Amino acid sequence: PAAVGHYREVLRLEMAGAEDGLNLRLDSLQRLHALHNLRAALEAAGPEAPVARTLRDDSLADDAEAERRKYVAQRAGGTFAAAADLRKVSESILANARICGASGSGPAGAAWWSALIDSHLRSADGGRSTLDRLVDNQLSGRWQGREIAFTDLAGLRFALETALDELGRRRGEFLDRLEHLAKVTADADPVDVEAAGKCVMCVAKTTMHDDDGGVVFAGRQRAKPASNRERNLRDIDATSGGGRTLCQHCAASPLFKRYEDVLFGHLGMDAEMTAAGRG
């Protein structure tokens, strides 16, 4: 009976919010959750339970199915559009990489810059003046956020080769995981579905707290995202130990973050070389 009351109150507050101008509303997933669980709570209570019934109870299943279809349509549409954009961008990257001489999906092999270094190495000072201008003016004495360690153009060549190899390797890992996630999403295993529902990272992103420490909102986050996420993660660390349940997407986050760090580190380097931008 208590659960029935809670879910009825959630739906009542949304309706009242629409009527009184406060614009309090639930998104599709929250509304689906409330409708589905209200129906399940009524069925669990049974016909003899001291629970007030309403005329709308008979339509709860249909209402929940309508919300489910709306939610899936919204999310699926965005997924298909994003997948199409990814394919388009990937094809463009591969085409341009081939023009630059790359031998695979990453930048490895695109060594036009190596010929440029060779030409400066053949100069009278072995490229020392070129390196000094590059280090002092364009790079400001730093490479990938650290103090420059190389002292000649051969060292610069090695640093570039190493950085590009790392970028290509991380990009390959990133694309492989994206392909894996697409397959998992299209044909989800029951274990993956259960993990998605219990993922501690997803919960941390979508649970809101009031100033007194109470949970006041569980759903898509609309305010104070950083502070609430940090608090939720601290709560998880304190209670779950090492046995966290993660969905496939959140489990892939560290890999995506490593690729992002490498990618934007290199972009930052390029920005400094061309416009004295970020380092």
Image: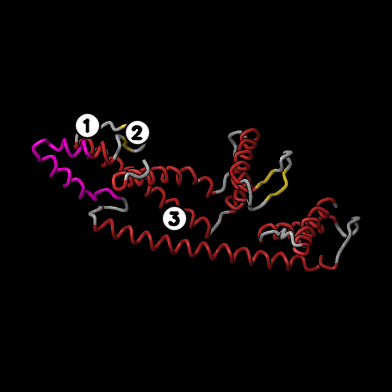
Can residue 131 be found in the magenta stretch?
A: yes
The amino acid type, in three-letter code, at marker 2 is: Arg
Inspect the image, locate mark 3, and give the three-letter code of the amino acid beneath it: Glu
Count residues near mark 3 (Cα–Cα under 10 Å), then give few for <14, some for 14-19, many for 20+.
Answer: few
Give the position of the C terminus as an image quadrant. Answer: top left
Report if residue 194 lies within the magenta region.
Answer: no
Q: Which residue is mark 1?
A: 151
Secondary structure, mark 3, is: helix
Colour scheme shown: secondary structure
Q: Which mark is residue 146?
A: 2
Image disc number at residue 179: 3
Of the image marks 2 and 1, the number of the one nearer the N terminus: 2
Disc 2 to disc 1, C-alpha distance: 14 Å
Q: Residues within 10 Å of mark 1 (few under 14, many from 20)?
A: few
Give how far apart the Cα atoms at labels 3 and 1 are. Answer: 41 Å
Query: Mark 2 to mark 3: distance in Å?
Result: 34 Å
Amino acid at pointer 1: Thr
Give the residue displayed 39% in from the left and 46% down from the top. 264
Q: Which residue occupies 67% across, 46% down?
A: 208
Residue 74 placement (x, y as % from top left)? 58, 65
